[in-house]
């Protein structure tokens, strides 16, 4: 059941990202200026180094005070992994506590999110060569990220609003998109250097199909047939989320010259593809599909300007029509 947040007196409402923005942040925007104008106006056109240092200071303040605000140790060291640790801490219960507490006349939630947005932006700048796009208010600051996927303006503030809101109707908390999901999809995956992953198994290793799928049975299956993969990783679906996927079966394909394992299985509403490296979970993709026939994955080489590259092709059915989904061996 979605959490409810008491706002504006005795009325209880489901907390969407839009409502969260309206109740906590909207009043702090420059008067007479549209949100569109705020979000496209450069607040540091002269590239003033003092403003950039202020961003660094803000990120440092968040690193120092977030543990106290959330009452848990997060080890916010500026790494990508720290964003994932922060993501797991952003529960509905913590959100409600931050909303109710006041500091310096402001809701602690506003101060927390404002500093957290800059902290996340700093991680993108530091770890992936992002470029600050300063805005006013500061929490609207974006980061321009150039990667093999192209150039994109990233707004950590919007990621936080969605991560802190109640999940959409019909979506459970365990399956809702998290801050870590967005960071992985929009930052880590585009900047991925999968060719540098260590080999975890011979490229011709064959793993048998898993016909009865449970979290514990999957663990034992991989322990038996791919003992080199010692960890599912922090972002592998939880046992509860894994159960919700309702897999009929799972197949396993070693890809990338042995650098990754691709799990494929039909579940509720379609097909799940899950990539795992030596660090465990790397990414996942969901493809809407019919329950039958069973989906099928195979690898093939595709010629590019840089030479042949290994790819994967998923064959499945949707509305009775044969379909295909293709990606590079490390995922789309």
Image: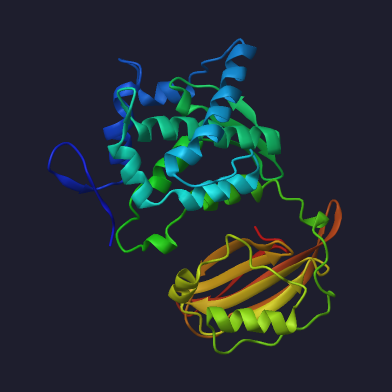
In which quadrant of the rendered view does residue 208 lie? Answer: bottom right
Residue 124 at x, y = what percent?
Answer: 63, 37
Q: Is residue 193 left or right of residue 217?
A: right
Question: Which residue lies most toward the right here?
Answer: 307
Residue 182 visible (yes or no): no
Residue 112 in the image: above or below residue 191 = above
Q: Position of residue 151 (x, y in %)?
A: 64, 37
The residue shown at (67%, 68%) is 231
Q: Nearer the viewer, residue 154 or 149?
A: 154
Compared with 146, 104 (above or below) is: above
Q: Quadrant of residue 53?
A: top right
> Residue 123: horizontal and vertical position, in percent?
63, 37
Q: Quadrant of residue 259?
A: bottom right
Q: Is residue 102 visible?
A: yes
State the residue at coordinates (54%, 78%). 215
Frontmost residue, 95 versus 308: 95
Q: Is residue 24 left or right of residue 66?
A: left
């Amino acid at each position: 059941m979605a959490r409810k947040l008491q706002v504006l007196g005795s009325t209880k409402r489901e907390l969407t990202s839009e409502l969260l923005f309206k109740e906590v942040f909207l009043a702090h925007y420059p008067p007479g200026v549209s949100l569109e104008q705020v979000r496209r106006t450069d607040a540091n056109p002269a590239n003033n180094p003092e403003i950039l240092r202020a961003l660094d200071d803000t990120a440092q303040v968040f690193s120092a005070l977030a543990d106290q605000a959330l009452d848990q140790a997060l080890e916010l060291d500026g790494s990508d992994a720290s964003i994932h640790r922060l993501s797991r801490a952003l529960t509905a219960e913590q959100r409600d506590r931050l909303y109710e507490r006041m500091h310096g006349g402001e809701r602690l939630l506003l101060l927390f999110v404002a500093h957290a947005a800059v902290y996340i932006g700093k991680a993108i700048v530091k770890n992936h060569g992002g470029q600050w796009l300063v805005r006013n208010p500061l929490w609207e600051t974006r980061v321009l990220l150039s990667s093999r996927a192209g150039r994109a303006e990233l707004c950590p503030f919007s990621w936080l609003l969605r991560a802190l809101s109640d999940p959409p109707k019909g979506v459970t908390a365990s399956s809702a998109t998290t801050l870590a999901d967005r960071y992985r999809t929009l930052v880590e995956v585009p900047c991925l250097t999968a060719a540098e992953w260590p080999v975890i198994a011979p490229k011709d290793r064959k793993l048998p199909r898993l016909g009865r799928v449970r979290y514990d049975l999957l663990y034992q299956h991989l322990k038996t047939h791919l003992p080199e993969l010692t960890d599912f990783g922090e972002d592998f679906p939880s046992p509860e989320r894994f159960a919700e996927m309702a897999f009929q079966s799972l197949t396993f394909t070693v890809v990338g010259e042995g650098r990754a394992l691709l799990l494929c299985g039909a579940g509720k509403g379609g097909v799940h593809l899950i990539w795992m490296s030596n660090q465990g979970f790397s990414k996942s993709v969901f493809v809407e599909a019919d329950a039958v026939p069973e989906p099928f994955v195979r690898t093939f080489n595709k010629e590019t300007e840089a030479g042949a590259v290994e790819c994967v092709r998923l064959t499945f059915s949707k509305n009775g029509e044969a379909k295909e989904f293709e990606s590079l061996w490390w995922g789309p």
